[in-house]
Image (cartoon, rainbow, N blue to C red):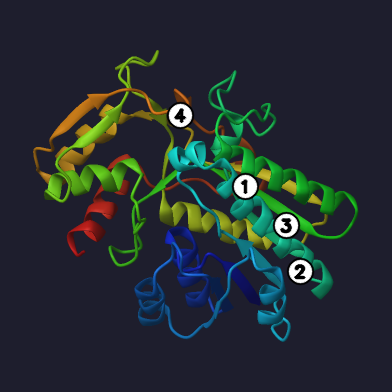
Amino acid sequence: MKILITGGAGYIGSITATKLILKGHDVIVLDNLEKGHKKTLDKIMRVAGEFEFIKVDLREKEKLELAISEVFFDAVIHFAAYIEIGRSVQQPEVFMRNNFGGTKNLLEVLEKKGVKKFLFSSTAAVYGHPEKVPIPETAHLDPINPYGESKVRVEKLLQEYADKGKMDSIRLRYFNPAGSYEGRIGELHEPETHLIPLILKAGKGERDKLFIFGDDYETKDGTAIRDYIHIMDLVDAHIAALDYLLKKHGSDVFNVGTGTGHTVKEVFETAKQVTGLEIPYEITERREGDSPELVADPAKINAVLKWRAQYNLNDILQSAWDFERQL
């Protein structure tokens, strides 16, 4: 099968591309390299082998249409997006133009090409402050930041496409991915905003300290709770979802998480155990746009896609540390 992966030079996209190539699929990576990295593309090549690369920005619709006019593929996995929640609060229009506007352009171009299968990288941020935890897919969508809102708008657009018979899609709402592919491909965000790499960089001395945003939440130790999922579990969920998508019509949605939440302090203590390092930290104010607790109810994906997370928090931290040490 031939698969187009947008944002394929980024963290999740690159590891998904690697796994699909190793499974024998033809992969086309599309990325503007604003957030993705050329060295990540080189790593995909070294680990998995040949693939096609297209450099284009989804916000430039005419250039996008031209870039893929002679390229044919069976399905699209769409990762390309801005992800920093804090920045989305500061620059909401920039996020909406990139995340929603770029996706809208992509869908319009794909529709003209007759592409019918679309797998979308959504987020637990669509739930905002959930009324029930663990969170089922049926929970009300009420994002509290522009990042989450941009994903909700795309989800609604995909549902409209499916309802009109234009395109089949699956939306994967995943929680907090972390870890690496065999210590070789991992998180390289600029700026880095994710907790686990920030902890590890503080341990290495690349940052003065880790900032913990708030210890006054109504949780067991006052810090926010998240559902951390190993990147390899997440990639396997994409592959399972892709197989399912090829056999079905319409649109569907799945949470991708473990169903187990961990506080920031629990992650911090696990990182200290894995690395053997004393890691400096400071408690500071809550970060605008953060939810107190986001934990997946994975019952639907467990039952329908026969997917279940295989790795625990210790596995995730070890995998992330293996990657961080070789940077």
Real-space CA distance between mark 3 and mark 1, rounded to the nearest whole angstrom: 11 Å
Which of marks 3 and 4 precedes in the sequence?
3
Residue 294 got which mark? none
**Direction from residue 199 to residue 159 in the image, left or right:** right
Q: Which residue is mark 2?
A: 110
Give the percent coordinates (x, y) of residue 146.
Answer: 57, 38
N-terminal label among 3 and 1: 1
Q: Is residue 180 left or right of residue 58?
A: left
Report the Cα–Cα distance between label 4 and label 3.
Answer: 27 Å
Q: State the image coordinates of residue 83 (x, y, percent, origin top left).
A: 48, 48
Q: Which tag, 1 or 4, sits closer to the chain's start?
A: 1
Percent coordinates x, y for residue 123 in the rendering? 56, 42
Q: Which residue lies under the disc numbered 1? A: 96
Looking at the rendered structure, the kind of residue marked 3 is: Lys
| Residue that appears at 44% across and 28% down | 288
Image position of 216 with respect to 203: above or below: above
Instruction: Residue 104: give its label.
Output: 3
- CA distance for labels 2 and 4: 34 Å
Q: Are marks 1 and 4 in contact (CB under 8 Å)?
A: no
Residue 52 in which image quadrant: bottom right
Q: Give the distance between the C-alpha atoms of the residues marked 1 and 4, in whole angstroms.
A: 18 Å
Pointer 4: residues within 10 angstroms few (<14), some, or many (20+)? some
Circle 4 is placed at which residue position? 290
Residue lying at 13% horizontally and 38% vertically, measured from the top left: 279
Provide the secondary structure element on which disc 1 rests: helix
Of the two numbered discs 3 and 1 in the rendering, the one whose residue sits closer to the viewer:
1
Marks 2 and 1, how far apart in space?
Answer: 20 Å
Answer above or below: position of 78 versus 290: below
Q: Secondary structure at mark 3?
A: helix
Q: Name the kind of residue labelled 4 in the image.
A: Asp
